[in-house]
Amino acid sequence: MNDFSPDFEKCRALLEKNREKFGKFSTLLFQFNARFNLTAITDPLEVEGKHFLDSLAGEELFMQGAKVAEVGSGAGFPSIPLMIAREDLFFTLIESTQKKCEFLRTAVSLLGLHAEVLCKRAEDAGKDPGYREKYDVCCARAVAPMPTLAEYCLPFVRRGGLFLAYKGEKCEDGKRAFALLGGREEGTYRYELPEKMGGRTLVAVRKISPTPPKYPRGRGAERKDPIV
C-alpha cells in the first residue's frame, strides 16, 4: 500500500459509467440542501470534483465485498459515491442528526444502495457489541481532528481491517492515538484533485489489536480531551 495514489482516470470512468445514478444523487442533494444545509458546495462542477471524485479517490483501498462503517455520514461522502461505483460494498451509515439521517435514508432507497442508516452517536455505537469490531473498514471524511476521529472510528474495525480518514490538505498527527486504540499507520497519501480543486490527504491505519474497552470514552471526552 506504500505506493498508493488515486487513479483519477479510473475515478472518472466509474463516474461516467454510473452517470445516471450520480445525476439522481446530485438532484436529491440540491433538493435537500435547500432545507437541511448539507453542503456549502453547490456548483455542479465543484460537487463532481470536490465531492464525487474525492470520495472515489480511495476506492482501491476498499477490499472486495467489504463491510464498511462510516462515521459522521452527513451528506453521504465518501459512502454514497463509493456505493454507486462499487455494488459489492455494504455500508452502515452512522449519523447522529435526524434530518441528515432522513436524507441518507431517502438516498439509499432512491438509488437502491446496499446500506443501513444508524441514527446514533458514534461513541455510543462504538460500545455496542453489535457494531464494535465488526467491520472490514471504517471511514470518515472531515469529521474531526485525527486523534478524535481515531477514537470514534477504530473501535468499529475488526483486527486486520482498516480505518481510512479522508482529510484536507493538512492533517493532524494521530500516531499516539492509533497505537493506544489498537492501530498502526500504514500510509499518509497526499494528492491534488483534478482541475486545481485543492489538495487532500488520505490516511490508512491497520487494526492490529483490539481496542481497549474504555474507548471510546463518551460524554464528549473524545473532543474535549483528545489523545495527543
Image (tube, rainbow, N blue to C red):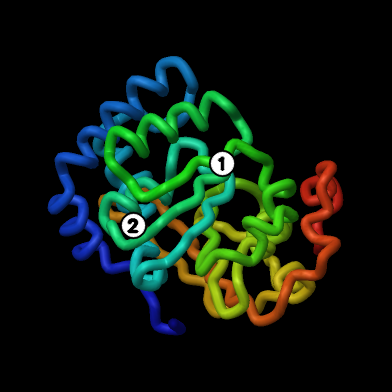
Kind of residue at disc 1:
Leu
Residue 185 in view here: no
Residue 20 located left or right of residue 128: left
Q: Which residue is mark 1?
A: 118
- 47 w.r.t. 215: above or below: above
Q: Is residue 48 left or right of residue 183?
A: left
Which amino acid does the dot numbered 2 rest on?
Leu
Q: Which mark's residue is nearer the viewer, 2 or 1?
A: 1
The image quadrant of residue 45 is top left
Q: Quadrant of the N terminus?
A: bottom left
Look at mark 2 in the image and give the residue it sits on: 56
Near-viewer residue (99 or 167): 99
Vertical placement of 99 versus 227: above or below?
above
Q: Would residue 201 appear left or right of 180 to someone viewing this image?
A: left
Task: Say few, some or many: other residues with alpha carbon within 10 Å of mark 1 (under 14 / 14 to 19 / 20 or more).
Answer: many
Q: Residues within 10 Å of mark 2 (few under 14, many from 20)?
A: many
Q: Classify 62 as above or below 27.
A: below
Q: Position of residue 18 (x, y in %)?
A: 17, 49
Q: Is residue 147 above or below residue 204?
A: above
x and y percent of residue 143 in the render? 60, 46
- Tell me the quarter of the image containing the C terminus: bottom right
**What residue do we see at 34% from left, 54% from top?**
82
| Distance (Cα) linking label 2 and label 1 | 23 Å
- For label 2, the SS is helix
Residue at 21 percent of width and 65 percent of height: 10
Is residue 180 visible in the rendered image? The answer is yes
Out of 113 and 96, give the one closest to the viewer. 113
